Amino acid sequence: MTSTSKAWEETVANSAPGGASDYNTKIIEEFRANEGRVGGPWAGTPMILIHHIGARSGTERVSPLGCSHQGDGRFAIVASNGGSPAHPDWYYNLKANPRIKAEVGAQTFTVVAEELDGPARAGLWPKLVAEAPNVGEFQARTTRQIPVFMLTRQD
């Protein structure tokens, strides 16, 4: 099991009321205090904070995610949910409200999230798995195809 995979397992294990939220809060605080760098099991993982709007609630939430820098203000993220049979909640939020704020390093900017499919997803998937092998492990755990989003900077 990779360290990122272990970190995800710890997040799931801490998903009792306040558990995962507290875990994410600590990552977000560390991210902001260190210009986008975090330690522990996430050390060395490129990170992004996405500010997504609840599809039903309209409430803004912030989620720390691993990302793949694609250049030209583009970042790929995967909705792996640790290989769970269900998409993460933020997946539905991005589908409903794709124009969001993102934090990378010490910068905050607007991005538009687009779910990739067909050849675009197929072409990028091997690169994502090579960069983060746990992504391939998560895909092996579930029958759903793990969605990939491209976040494109707007400002």
Image (cartoon, rainbow, N blue to C red):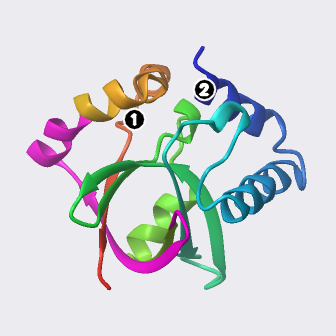
**The C terminus lies in quadrant:** bottom left
Looking at the image, residue 47 lies above or below residue 73: above
- Dot 1 or dot 2: first in sequence order is 2
Q: Nearer the viewer, residue 32 or 116?
A: 32
* Amino acid beneath label 1: Arg
* Amino acid beneath label 2: Ser
Q: Secondary structure at mark 2?
A: helix
Q: Nearer the viewer, residue 53 or 110?
A: 110
- Which residue reaches farthest top? 1
Q: Quarter-wise, where is residue 130 in the image?
A: top left
**Magenta-tinted stretch:** 104-125
**Residue identified by numbered label 2:** 5
Q: Which mark is residue 144?
A: 1
Mark 1 vs mark 2, foreground winner is 2
Looking at the image, residue 128 lies above or below residue 52: above
Q: Which mark is residue 100?
A: none
Rate crowding at label 1 as few (under 14), some (14 to 19) or many (20 or more) other CA atoms within 10 Å. Answer: some
Q: Nearer the viewer, residue 76 or 92?
A: 76
